[in-house]
Image (spheres, rainbow, N blue to C red):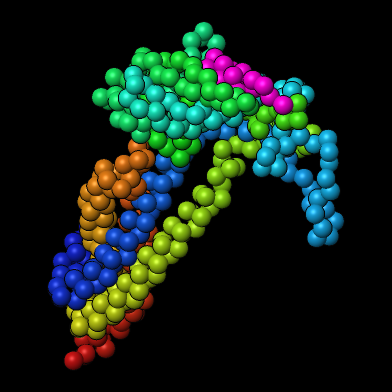
Amino acid sequence: MNPLDVLKSAVSNTFRNKVRTLLTVIAIFIGAFTLTITSAIGAGVSSYIDAQISSIGGDSMLTVSSAPDAAPAGDGPTPYDPDKQATASGMSLLSEDDVTAIAAVDGIADVQPAVMLSPDFIEFDGNGKFEIAVNPMAGIATIDLAAGAQLENGAGQNQILLPASYVDGLGFADAESAIGQPVTLAISDYEGTQHTVEAVVQGVQNDSLFASGAGLNADLRDELDALKQTAKPAAVPSGYVMAIAFLADGTTPAQLDDIQAALTEQGLLGMTVTDQIGAIQDVINGIIGVLNAFAVIALIAAGFGIINTLLMSVQERTREIGLMKAMGMGGGKIFALFSFEAIFIGLLGSALGAAVAIGLGSGLSSALSATVLSGLPGLTIMLFTPASIATIIGIVMAIAFLAGTLPARRAAKQNPIDALRYE
């Protein structure tokens, strides 16, 4: 009996007891289905986060701020420093000297201080005034757009990126129709006097994890900041909450560590986007890992079902095994016969589980994207990839093979004379 005949015989023997095989396949199906779904969720969420990080520069730039004060000895409070400039929240501000020092760090190509602005309202064509937040990263990084173009700094024109959620409220028919239209922004100075500024809608940005709020180009940002600083009291500290440091092209992880260490020596804290959301990714990966562990436990339980199925098959086919050995079939081929049966059962359960998971998961993912997750365009909550599906099927088949080794060895070691006498 050649290997192909052994394989054909294994497939046909699998269906000798259809009910028993079906129950075993269902057990594997449940584990493979669960593992496919949880893996797809992990891949979808990770892919979305990676895309969002890439859209704003990824690890090509650092958000630099003043480093937190070292904790005082013991449990006492931090001593007051009258010379330290800080925001109302207690965060130390960056001075112009700090910005210059950041630019001087080897490996940093450019630095742009981020100005924090809070306009009073935005209005278009008398359709009502609406509060609007400003995203300090927009205008510095590349933003994921629904329509229009990126902001142009130094263009000699005030430009704004509108959040997609503002399009309808401001009175635009859609994102495309907002492009090039003038809007009015208002901001109050320190005396409470309100000033208005005209700006042109340069683009509409998709809502995302890191792009909340409107984006302003440098021209508009500087004009609003100058109006805000009108009648500023001398006691109000000056400075920047943070600055964006752009890394030189080709910066390696080791060089990035050196840059961050150099900033730390100057009392500054430089963090990439990955650093800032690392805790979130760790939590997501932990949850997915736990779910995958439950799926693997289900597959291991299904492995015991394979052992039971094949042990019963070996017992029922004892005389048949003895006859095959008497006709010259070696123990190795008998071992392969039962191993192929186990692998085939694993293939059936895993392939069916993966196929159903892809069908149901894709439909559910599309429905969620159009409803509950519509505010996060580009998010595919379940991402099925050929590589991950093939890996899952391979893992299940490996578990099935390991489960089948015990009954396969038992069959291979059968004494042909005793087997032929078996009643």
User: Is residue 225 shown in magenta?
Assistant: yes
Above or below 364: residue 310: below
Res 387 visible: no
Dominant secondary-structure state across the stretch colored magenta: helix
Q: Determine the image quadrant of residue 238.
A: top right
* Image x and y of residue 90, in percent: 70, 42
* Image x and y of residue 227, in percent: 59, 19
Most foreground residue, 422 or 307:
307
Which region shows up in magenta? 217-233
Res 222 visible: yes
Most foreground residue, 149 or 158:
158
Most foreground residue, 272 or 338:
272
Q: How many marks?
A: 0
Tell me if 150 is positioned left or right of 75 in this view: left
Q: Determine the image quadrant of residue 355.
A: bottom left
Locate the C terminus and report the quarter of the image it occupies.
Answer: bottom left
User: Is residue 31 shown in magenta?
Assistant: no
| Residue drawn 54% across the image and 14% down it | 219
Above or below 388: residue 215: above
Q: Determine the image quadrant of residue 276.
A: top right
* Image x and y of residue 239, in percent: 70, 28
Locate the N terminus and report the quarter of the image it occupies.
Answer: bottom left
